[in-house]
């Protein structure tokens, strides 16, 4: 008997188990799902993000790389981030046959994304022709978290069998677009045997961007060098003949700098690339890996007993960490992060309500950057308020570079591209102003950053309150109302007195008044300055108090049931059986039509439950229970908003329904990994990613922050044996470790 062959290797098992919760793998390539996987395999470093496109390309691919703040205008007076020149591409020929995975014969394939380090790699064996050699190709790339302006690609080619005449070409490619829109004009380029340099400028906004790529080659055999000077495509070439066991490795170091950060981006990009090349691939990676370890130390959430949930949590946290601006406080995270063209990278309420809490609790410096983006863009919010006839600051529903409203007015129907649909959100979905104030107040409450609140946050909150007081309408019933609005449930638009909107406006006004009391007591000079600058006289402040105290809230005083908006209870009740039909593959508006769905009580996301989640102190457990029981069955959990499942999970925990909480949690967990809504190719659902962290930490762990500390109320799902995480409270890194008995 061979005892050695039956020995259990505990170390290998532990490594495999750890990889299963940290590494995304793709054991086989499915061309039909390539655009989805390009989103899933997005990597980045907070300055730029690059989709998981193959280095050599593939038919139907959607390659893209985006950098914060490089906005360029598009038709109909809107703007988007410009897809930057392709720096990661590598063309390979074996015996004059160009390598691509739809050519020749792919004998093996494996792709992996290590979430611990942000390194994307792919290994495969390929034969260009039936009688040709077998080569093993290994690709690896990462964007440095230690230096946001640096990225690197490694390509290794080894002959397994036969003889291969190898040709490699790599450089920079300015011939890129945003779904057909061209944003770049070529200014200059250069190529030498070891370097390619490119300088481009956005066509409308005039932002310069410089890229430099430096190539280092190692091989067991001699090689020759060359260049390619095609317009907009400076490139470097390497040629070698490889036989059994022989290999060639090409390391490519890229420096990327825009005119937003430097007066001389060409010089800076070249210096960055040269420094990286001098350090070498291993040293560059080690520095980035170390920085990743530092971020994961605070942001990781540990789940034991559920490998799928653990991997999904880390994946979603990773996607937010790579999109969060580290280098600037004039950018934030768009609804689709930096991973695709969905919503053209515009910033919505998704950011403050769903993504920001992860950073507030685990990376407060990044949270501060994201909130400062709103402060810098207060002029745009003031302009919108003034245009609409209001005072103060009304934040745009969709925001880009300067805080102006960039929501499209018209869109095309999903079922008939010839039909235009009016988009009302930019005009009347006004709750975002309170959502931003809530994010600012939560940041202050958790971090205790009095200096930020004094210098910046207070102005955001007070200017927003001024808007609410001017927009509220006093009517004959003696109550203040908001008519013709849209709440979080966008299946119903142009409605009156949305409970979420009215209650958040009431909260915002009351909070602003309390904030002024704090300012007067703590920073009297700043209090006087803000009151003067914002014209906050006693009469105006008295009006704020009046609006807050007499805000109309559609709430049954006996049962505590909240009507989502005036007239909601008069609509056709939801067909719960149709909503829960497992065979359904479309949203309810697609099945019933937009107007048909609006005539029912079916809701896109849990509007009222979101209100109760945010204003937790305002509602009793009994009131939460009755509203959960009413609205949870009427929500289009499966194909409605990706924002909804995480909030539903938290509220299920609040009422003690752990099983339902887990079901909602896994809907959010699978949103992008399994492409459950069939739109992940457009980019990561950032709100769902942030909501998943909230569902774990604020839902299952039940973390709650108070003025004098914090506490937890665990509601772990069946099967979870441990839930552990860290968070900052008032500058101190706290640890929570919840374990079930046994």
Image (cartoon, rainbow, N blue to C red):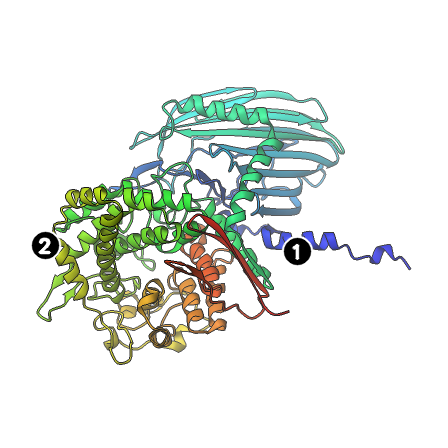
Query: The C terminus is located in which quarter?
Result: bottom right
Mark on residue 50? none
* Left or right of 540 on screen, residue 599: right
Residue 574 to residue 174: above or below: below
- Residue that lies at the very extreme toward the left in this rendered image: 476
Which of the pair 462/450 is nearer the observer?
A: 450
First in sequence: mark 2 or mark 1?
Answer: 1
Name the residue that disc number 1 marks. Answer: 17
Q: CA distance from mark 2 to mark 1?
A: 64 Å
* Left or right of 435 on screen, residue 16: right
In percent of width and height, residue 439 lies at: 33, 53
* Left or right of 585 on screen, residue 391: left
Q: Nearer the viewer, mark 2 or mark 1?
A: 2
Can residue 394 be seen in the rendering of this structure? no
Indicate the quadrant where residue 289 lies.
top right
Q: Please tell me whether mark 1 sits on a helix, a strand or a loop.
A: helix
In percent of width and height, residue 175 lies at: 42, 32
Can residue 508 be seen in the rendering of this structure? yes
Residue 348 to residue 574: above or below: above
* Left or right of 86 on screen, residue 405: left
Query: The N terminus is located in which quarter?
Result: bottom right
In percent of width and height, residue 340 lies at: 42, 46
Q: Residue at 19%, 62% (x, y): give it.
A: 548
Mark on residue 539? 2
């Amino acid at each position: 008997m061979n005892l050695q062959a039956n020995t259990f290797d505990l170390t290998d098992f532990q490594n495999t188990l750890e990889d299963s919760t940290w590494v995304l793998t793709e054991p086989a390539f499915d061309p039909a799902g390539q655009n989805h996987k390009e989103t899933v395999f997005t990597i980045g470093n907070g300055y730029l993000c690059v989709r998981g496109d193959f280095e050599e390309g593939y038919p139907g691919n959607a390659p893209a790389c985006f950098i914060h703040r490089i906005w360029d205008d598009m038709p109909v007076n809107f703007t988007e981030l410009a897809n930057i020149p392709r720096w990661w591409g590598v063309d390979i020929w074996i015996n004059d046959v160009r390598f691509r995975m739809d050519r020749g014969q792919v004998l093996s394939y494996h792709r992996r994304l290590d979430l611990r380090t942000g390194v994307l790699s792919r290994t495969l064996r390929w034969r260009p022709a039936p009688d040709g050699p077998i080569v093993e190709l290994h690709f690896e790339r990462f964007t440095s978290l230690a230096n946001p302006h640096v990225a690197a690609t490694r390509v290794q080619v080894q002959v397994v069998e036969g003889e291969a005449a190898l040709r490699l070409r790599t450089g920079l490619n300015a011939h890129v677009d945003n779904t057909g829109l061209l944003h770049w004009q070529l200014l200059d380029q250069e190529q030498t045997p070891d370097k390619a340099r490119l300088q481009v400028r956005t066509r409308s906004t005039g932002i310069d961007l410089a890229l430099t790529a430096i190539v280092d080659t190692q091989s067991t055999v001699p090689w020759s060098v060359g260049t390619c000077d095609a317009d907009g495509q400076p490139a470097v070439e390497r040629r070698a003949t490889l036989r059994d066991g022989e290999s060639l490795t090409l390391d490519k170091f890229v420096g990327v700098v825009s005119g937003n950060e430097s007066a001389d981006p060409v010089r800076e990009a070249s210096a960055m690339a040269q420094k990286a090349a001098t350090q070498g691939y291993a040293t560059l990676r080690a520095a980035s890996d170390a920085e990743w370890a530092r971020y994961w130390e605070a942001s990781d959430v540990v789940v034991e007993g559920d490998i799928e949930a653990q991997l999904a949590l880390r994946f979603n946290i990773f996607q937010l960490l790579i999109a969060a601006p580290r280098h600037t406080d004039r950018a934030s995270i768009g609804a689709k992060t930096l991973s695709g063209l969905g919503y053209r990278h515009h910033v919505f309420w998704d950011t403050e309500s769903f993504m920001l809490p992860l950073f507030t609790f685990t990376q407060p410096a990044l949270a501060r950057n994201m909130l400062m983006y709103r402060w810098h863009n207060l002029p745009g919010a003031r302009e919108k308020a003034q245009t609409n006839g209001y005072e103060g600051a009304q934040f745009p529903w969709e925001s880009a570079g300067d805080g102006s409203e960039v929501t499209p007015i018209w869109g095309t129907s999903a079922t008939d591209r010839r039909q235009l649909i009016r988009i009302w959100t930019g005009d009347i979905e006004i709750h975002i102003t309170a959502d931003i104030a809530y994010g600012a107040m939560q940041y202050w409450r958790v971090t205790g950053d009095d200096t930020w609140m004094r210098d910046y946050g207070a102005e955001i909150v007070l200017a927003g309150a001024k808007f609410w007081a001017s927009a509220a309408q006093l009517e004959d019933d003696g109550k203040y109302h908001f008519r013709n609005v849209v709440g979080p449930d966008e299946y119903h638009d142009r409605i009156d007195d949305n409970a979420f909107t009215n209650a958040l406006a009431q909260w915002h006004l009351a909070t602003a008044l309390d904030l002024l009391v704090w300012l007067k007591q703590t920073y009297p000079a700043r209090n006087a300055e803000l009151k003067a600058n914002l014209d906050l006289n006693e009469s105006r402040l008295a009006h704020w108090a009046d609006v807050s105290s007499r805000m109309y809230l559609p709430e049954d005083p006996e049962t505590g049931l909240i009507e989502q908006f005036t007239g909601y209870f008069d609509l056709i009740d939801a067909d719960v059986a149709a909503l829960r039909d497992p065979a359904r593959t479309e949203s309810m508006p697609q099945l019933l039509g937009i107007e048909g769905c609006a005539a029912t009580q079916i809701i896109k996301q849990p509007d009222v439950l979101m209100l109760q989640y945010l204003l937790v102190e305002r509602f009793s457990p009994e009131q939460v229970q009755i509203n959960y029981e009413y609205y949870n069955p009427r929500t289009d959990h499966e194909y409605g908003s990706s924002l909804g499942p995480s909030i539903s999970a938290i509220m299920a925990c609040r009422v003690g329904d752990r099983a339902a909480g887990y079901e909602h949690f896994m809907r959010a967990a699978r949103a992008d990994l399994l492409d459950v809504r069939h739109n992940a190719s457009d980019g990561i659902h950032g709100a769902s990613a942030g909501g998943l962290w909230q569902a774990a930490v604020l839902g299952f762990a039940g973390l709650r922050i108070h003025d004098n500390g914090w506490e937890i109320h665990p509601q772990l799902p069946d099967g979870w044996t441990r839930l552990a995480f860290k968070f900052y409270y008032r500058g101190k890194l706290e640890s929570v470790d919840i374990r079930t008995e046994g």
